[in-house]
Image (cartoon, coloured by chain):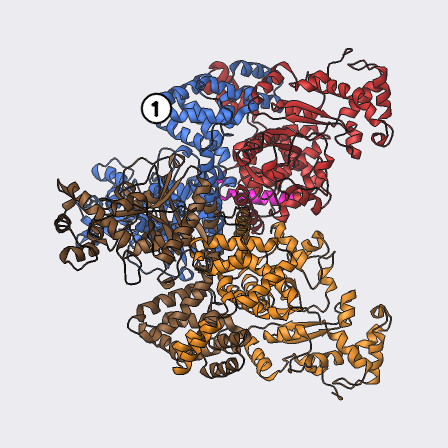
Chain colours: A orange, B brown, C blue, D red
Amino acid sequence: MRSSFLQGLFQSIAKRGRRMLQRQPAFGIDGVDMPALSQAILSGRGEASGTALASTLLEDWKRLDQSGRLSFFQHLASNFGPDHERIAASLAAYQAEPDDAQAMALHEAAEPRRQELFRRLNRAPRGTLQLVAMRAELLGLLREHRELASVDRDFEHLLASWFNRGFLVLDRIDWNTPASILERIIQYEAVHAIRSWEDLRRRIEPADRRCYAFFHPALVDDPLIFVEVALTQGIPAAIAPILAAERSPLAAEHADTAVFYSISNCQAGLRGISFGNFLIKQVVEDLKRDLPYLKTFVTLSPAPTLRKWLSGHANEDQGEVVLSDAERSALARLDAPDWHLGEDADALKPVLMPLVAWYFLHARRGDGTPVDPVARFHLGNGARLEQIDWLGDVSERGLGEAAGFMVNYLYDLRHIEENHELYANQRQVVASSAVNRLGRRANA
Amino acid sequence: MRSSFLQGLFQSIAKRGRRMLQRQPAFGIDGVDMPALSQAILSGRGEASGTALASTLLEDWKRLDQSGRLSFFQHLASNFGPDHERIAASLAAYQAEPDDAQAMALHEAAEPRRQELFRRLNRAPRGTLQLVAMRAELLGLLREHRELASVDRDFEHLLASWFNRGFLVLDRIDWNTPASILERIIQYEAVHAIRSWEDLRRRIEPADRRCYAFFHPALVDDPLIFVEVALTQGIPAAIAPILAAERSPLAAEHADTAVFYSISNCQAGLRGISFGNFLIKQVVEDLKRDLPYLKTFVTLSPAPTLRKWLSGHANEDQGEVVLSDAERSALARLDAPDWHLGEDADALKPVLMPLVAWYFLHARRGDGTPVDPVARFHLGNGARLEQIDWLGDVSERGLGEAAGFMVNYLYDLRHIEENHELYANQRQVVASSAVNRLGRRANA
Amino acid sequence: MRSSFLQGLFQSIAKRGRRMLQRQPAFGIDGVDMPALSQAILSGRGEASGTALASTLLEDWKRLDQSGRLSFFQHLASNFGPDHERIAASLAAYQAEPDDAQAMALHEAAEPRRQELFRRLNRAPRGTLQLVAMRAELLGLLREHRELASVDRDFEHLLASWFNRGFLVLDRIDWNTPASILERIIQYEAVHAIRSWEDLRRRIEPADRRCYAFFHPALVDDPLIFVEVALTQGIPAAIAPILAAERSPLAAEHADTAVFYSISNCQAGLRGISFGNFLIKQVVEDLKRDLPYLKTFVTLSPAPTLRKWLSGHANEDQGEVVLSDAERSALARLDAPDWHLGEDADALKPVLMPLVAWYFLHARRGDGTPVDPVARFHLGNGARLEQIDWLGDVSERGLGEAAGFMVNYLYDLRHIEENHELYANQRQVVASSAVNRLGRRANA
Amino acid sequence: MRSSFLQGLFQSIAKRGRRMLQRQPAFGIDGVDMPALSQAILSGRGEASGTALASTLLEDWKRLDQSGRLSFFQHLASNFGPDHERIAASLAAYQAEPDDAQAMALHEAAEPRRQELFRRLNRAPRGTLQLVAMRAELLGLLREHRELASVDRDFEHLLASWFNRGFLVLDRIDWNTPASILERIIQYEAVHAIRSWEDLRRRIEPADRRCYAFFHPALVDDPLIFVEVALTQGIPAAIAPILAAERSPLAAEHADTAVFYSISNCQAGLRGISFGNFLIKQVVEDLKRDLPYLKTFVTLSPAPTLRKWLSGHANEDQGEVVLSDAERSALARLDAPDWHLGEDADALKPVLMPLVAWYFLHARRGDGTPVDPVARFHLGNGARLEQIDWLGDVSERGLGEAAGFMVNYLYDLRHIEENHELYANQRQVVASSAVNRLGRRANA
């Protein structure tokens, strides 16, 4: 039922959004140059006809070509930063009397004027949506234009506050969801591509499939992030049976395990603002409530950098781990096309599984965190490394990136806090005893 | 139709809110002392089980008595302010290299740690609602506990950002609105009290009455501000006919004027965050679109400090204006009970009208703005002082506060910007020529 | 949640209804006399512009005064009955060949032409609503105009088909229900009058109160029938504690009993079409599902004809039962005002309880069914007579109609069918052993 | 906005439907044989646990195989017809006193008992849906089992009453419609097949496309009939540009013409119950209101039997019309594949156009109505034959059935009634003067 109301909700907001788009700029202001307009919005004029001015600026911005947009961002970087004179005054006052009140004055004085500009732009109809789109554009320019980093920082600060988890609404995505939203699910799926509407339907309609997304009221019918879930008996060790076109669905109440097999961010303009942690935990809670027989909540996750790490260690002896001959020879075989279809492919399993377990347990970056980015995300959320899956993903991508390996991370809400603390404070990778046993290497 | 969807929307959110309230604290954390809990929320632990910790703190806070709540606020004031060591370091760095990047670092260093705490509390289910309630409580304590002013400033900063006009949704209130919302309209009406459900119905059900409110998605079914509108032929000069129990409604399409006769804020915890300006302008735009025959948009406003000002000048000769004998004698008569029912009451009109016009045009406070608070609000929005109404409100309150006078302010969207600028920059009270003529006094 | 969607649903339908009301008659037909119009609707013309003609007739009808409406009904009675020529032909054919096909032809030939007229009128926007209103008017005329009985029969036949239980939707009424619906609940409550909005709120808002109504999609926001439910611990024996202004609500999950204490029909125009049976059983099923701890489903019912029956037997010895002296003397005391407040009122209890039990178990009408109409309803539904309540309703009405007695009927879904059969086939009043024991009289 | 609420409405009803499907049969009745069950439902028992019995029968029916279903229908035909004894009695009474009251008694006596059975089955959750499915099955059996015709007649009678236009709700279908409904649109489109989700999107998403459907509250999310509309400038003469994958949409407010280019019935079980007439007229009214610049409402219709008629007259001289040599030779060329792509194809136009106009104006069936079924539908609705389109549909089907011809019928609400009367009473085909001129043949 939850789904029902949220669908109604966001459809309605979507319609409202669309209606607003068709509106005329309200007070007849147009053709103003953008720096002047930005200035006007920040000035007193903004108070009388603020939303109209903001709308105008946002409309004008959409009509700019890429170089115009770059100029606008550069203008924001140069001319809408903090007011150094005001800082100097506040700073002197703080030094004279370094108390909390002066600190607050200093804090306010040092705020870049862009932040107030963005807050005022946000008042326009669909302003939030536009600001997110603006930031997506800015992120694309950032690599070549480091001078825009400060503008991005202001965007990120405000967006993080506005997209606070408290404002997000969880909605179930199913076959009754409007097509306009479903097409975005197809388009945004980043882990296991959705190839057609039929493929989509297989992921959301059967009784043993779920899909949930976070939405934000200001972003109309555009999801922020979504997760695909399979209900199973036991922890699955491969993705193909889950995505199979032909299979008999399980009755939901016969499942004991919920498998998070794909999680995708949707909004480029919200990069750096994390929703995944909240989404998974909320879905775990909701599933527990709706399906009390579910006992286990795990992911079925890719290992996107595993193959690259293995290659580094197979080719040279510079790695953190000294390879045995057997390992070296096993790694060499991974380059052969369709190696996993070979008769003796399974002979590689006892050689590679311990090495891969070692990778997940011990391979680290300079800052002490695991090499694997997916591991960093789930361990950081307080999940436990539960199982390593041999030939879990034999798609071209799965073989190419991870030699076919997949991983299960376990979300046990009773333990996520202690897991998280061990990980955060001591960089410890909390793992099941099976994985720990597997990862014990003589030569490590 | 707008109303239809928003009602659905907020009803649903309300139900969701209520459902969430019934949830158990999720991860079994309880009985923790609030300072420790606050600390935990800000620390790394907050990342793993953040929303659960936040919920716990908010639940615990509700169970505190008033002195406990005061202690909590004082704790926030003393222990969750800015980090002065971090400021000192940033400050030194800024002085060494006073550029935008260092200014940003300084800005961040000087942010009170309360702000991040509040952002994290906001992640809890119904967190926003709770924070607004917390601030309402805080505002009550503020007069006697000035040490809490810094806490209030942080609340106000965050709430102003979260309740940005871009996140507000306008909804029409009518007789199909859920009773739970209507009872709040009854309760919050601050200008012309609603005495019963029948009285309410007379203000929202007839074809020539409208009521609109701003809602925020996180505040479930609680309006932020609402405005009551009468559709009329011509500008009304008195409130009684509008509130009359017995009257024949006008067909909406026969009206040429929309009268904003009452506007009330609802949320004590959002004091200082202004919605009225946006609300009036949005309603003007919506009414123009739905009822294209409407040509005039005016208020019918009280003058809450007029009588007090008149008294000041009637009793002594110290005022800004030298009163004539006629005026002095007229003012003296206002103390008699039911003076307005006297046979010769109308004889006072030509004496008092110019004086009152002068009050609206010229009586100023120290900062150069008008004495009348309602005038300040509407003139600041860019409205024009249109008409002074003799015996516009002969209720006890109307006579007591304003000698029966009311005022109409005109909202003409084509002119609000220039009106606003004249007012904001030159403190000029833009008025109709009729009022200007009326206010010309020889002795002023 | 059910309530949430249905509210949305019917609010929306209500809005649609209202929008339709504002529409202009579509094809410019007007000023036609109603007999001609009725004829046109039934003729070929009705096919091209049928809904427009139907709308016109319904609008015209509303403008008629009472005598005009009577004439119209009489016209329907005289001129839109069956076609006797057609019957004669079909009848001859049937007699020649009395098979199913000829019977069907006869059935169709004998259908009054009014039925097709009503079906075509129903095509107009809000046609169903209008036809129900028309029948309400007709029922008022029926007593003095028996010639209209045939018109009423056609109305009843069609309405019974259109208001088939399969088309009804159950909605929960609570404090989030639109005021426009709540005011009808106040107005329609027929058992224990609702005196104010506060009184209403006490019946629908607390955690241990429920109210459900049946709605029909074509009747917009007008309920058909509603039932008020109290959740309690144990079977209550009096109404006052349930309606009390001051009481501490029970948490719903602590209740073991659901008490149906008021059930009211809303639509005069649907008289004779029974919804109560379906409503109670549906609510029992829904409550069982939502609140699994509920074990007992009972009514707390009035006994509207008890006092009258008792009086009959107290005054003369002609009744079905021979009264003892003690009974005779006890009955005599019931005429004293406030007898129930007397010190020795309870002394009457052992005397009257068996007599009242006998009334419920054995007092019959000519057709063998119980004298008590409420008993007939619940026993006919398969409920069991569970308990007789001494001083259950000491309101003026309760004392006046039932000497303060109330009754509980038990709905046990496992037994309703056999109870119903015993009642329907053998006129047996199925009762609890306690009531059966109570009702055993030596002299009966 | 209309669309918004109806979507919400039917989604909700759909969810409710689905929830009900998952319910357990309520009172534990199961395994009963269907004849007995049917009998029980009609008997007194049906009153106590009627909906449970009805659910059981409907569930049991679904589990039957085809021969079981046939047996059940045959059982209904043989054993649930009218009660001939009761007829005989009523008949005698009627003959004794042939008045309206006796006619009514006869009408009721002659009603097949199936009708009451169906009304009681309809009380079950989703009963209406099931009955429609039952009739769809029955219609499939009817050709080979004429003994079931009486059962079908009862189905049709009740369904026609229950699906009265007054109970239908119009909904707009667009890209925000739930996928579960859109897939049915794809599946049910009967005129110009929808080949993919992209093809569907081109018909419902652009600003100059509309799609509307009638829904019935009891049929959850399953449309009854839908119509596809293109907004254009001027009357289009070919379908290909409307269905083209690549085209620039027109702003809706720039269109002057609405073209109904496809209308499809969805429910096999509702055959014989006509919705198309109501749908077109309702959509015309709604479009007029929403887009006041629309002046012309036409169809772009197929001529499904034209080619067959032409062939009949090309091959032999027995037709109603004597063909010229030129016509004969032109008709012969239509058999060549891709004849329309030939260089001189347009030379056929002046030869064939008058012949085709004649066909539409004069070719009749035995009952005097036009040979063309689409013409019968639109002329019967009061539309006017407006334009004959040369090479309007050069798809395989269009060439095969209609030699590429299409037709426009004009809906002018001011004239539909007189058009309809001329057609209904005098079999006159009302046509534009252009078509009338074209259709004048010397030899006709």
| Residue B31 in view, yes or no | no
Residue at x 26% of width, y 47% of height: B406
The quarter of the picture where the C terminus of chain C appears is top left
What chain does badge 1 belong to?
A: C
Q: Nearer the viewer, residue D273 or C282?
A: D273
A422 or B90: nearer the eye? B90
The answer to which quarter of the image holds residue D219 is: top right
How many residues crowd around disc 1 within 10 Å: few (fewer than 14), some, or many (20 or more)? few
Q: Position of residue D283 (x, y in %)?
A: 57, 33
Q: Nearer the viewer, residue A32 or B315?
A: A32
- Image vertical order of residue D287 relative to residue D63, above or below: above
Q: Is residue D300 above or below residue D92?
A: below
Q: Of residues C430 and B220, which is closer to you in this image? A: B220
Q: Of all residues shown, which one is farthest toward the bottom?
A: A442
Could you say whether the residue bearing mark 1 is in a helix, strand or loop? Answer: helix
Q: Which residue is mark 1?
A: C66
Magenta-span inclusion, residue D49: yes
Does C241 appear above or below D414? below
Query: What residue do we see at 47% from left, 34% from top?
Result: C20
Q: Which residues are magenta?
A: D44-62
Dominant secondary-structure state across the stretch colored magenta: helix
Residue B325 x %, y %: 12, 50
What's the amino acid at mark 1?
Gln
Q: Position of residue D344 (x, y in %)?
A: 85, 27
Please give left or right for residue C347 compared with residue B300 in the image.
left
Residue C208: tell me if it is visible. yes
Magenta-span inclusion, residue A73? no
